[in-house]
Amino acid sequence: MTMMVAFHDVSKIFPDGTVALRGVSLEIPRGAFTVLLGASGAGKSTLLYLVNGMTRASAGAVDVEGVRIGPRTLRHVQRTVSMIHQQFQLVDRLSVLDNVLSGALRDISTGRALIKWFTAEQRRRACELIEMVGLGPEHVYRRASDLSGGQQQRVAIARAFISMPRIVLADEPVSSLDPGTSEEILTLLKDTARQFGVTVLCSLHQVDLALEFADHIIGMRQGRLEFEGPAHEKREALARLYDKAEQEHCETLIQQH
């Protein structure tokens, strides 16, 4: 399997001295649903943000499809990457359609963006994606603030795919949802990515969800890479990611799966 993203001895130290990543080297398989797993503060979000340039490495390098991220290549790389956020980050007063279309703003000029002048093809694709994520015609012009949390995350998924990305980053996309809705959203994300041939890098802290959905698992602990590989090979290593109090719960989940 070819690699989509490669991290080369990457470290990240924030201005306040916090060490988020410590010499991480790993590769993300193309087309896989890869889960970043670890406790809070393990460095998962920082690793995600390095891929789309929302943060820059203090040391080391990141390649996306063989292109080294840097000042001259960042814009090119960003056009291939979309992101789904933990708190949805929709504009409450805008309609579902306008929120989905906002994912295509990077594909149009500033002038057109200011007046929301999208092409007929972009609008058609937005409506198709709204239907694909399980929302009906009655939702198209509904304000985002009127939707449930699960519905809002469905809108966020549609927004992420409208620009036809090659990579989708998902930062704890179900942490604010109930267990049943969490499974629905991750199923939707994985199925949609598979349909379009998109690589997903998704951070989670729920072991049971990682075991259920991941093709590939990356285990992080205190900014270090603990392990990485096909999900079915890493079940027994998962408990190493957590403190003793959490390990027993983790081991129970592993046995259940």
Image: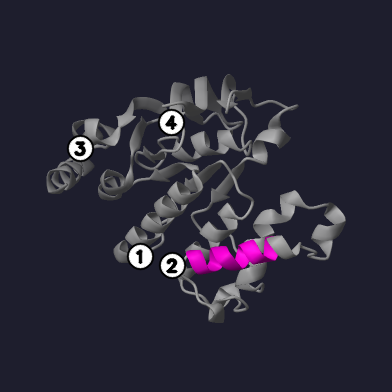
What's the residue at 73%, 49% (across, down)? 106
* Residue 43 percent across, percent down from the top left: 45, 35
Horizontal side of 143 relative to 157 (left or right) equals right
- The residue wearing badge 1 is 181
Is the magenta region chiefly helix, strand or loop?
A: helix
Residue 52 on the magenta span:
no
Residue contact at pointers 2 and 4, CB within 8 angstroms: no
* Residue 257 percent across, percent down from the top left: 17, 47
What's the residue at 44%, 23% (across, down)? 26
Magenta segment:
122-132
Q: Secondary structure at mark 1?
A: helix
| Three-letter code, disc 4 | Pro
* Residue 183 percent across, percent down from the top left: 33, 59
Q: In this rendered view, identify the residue nearer to me: 58 or 195.
A: 195
Q: Secondary structure at mark 3?
A: helix
- The residue wearing badge 2 is 150
Residue contact at pointers 3 and 2, CB within 8 angstroms: no
Which image quarter: residue 25?
A: top left
Which is more N-terminal, label 1 or label 2?
2
Q: Which mark is residue 244?
A: 3
| Three-letter code, disc 1 | Thr
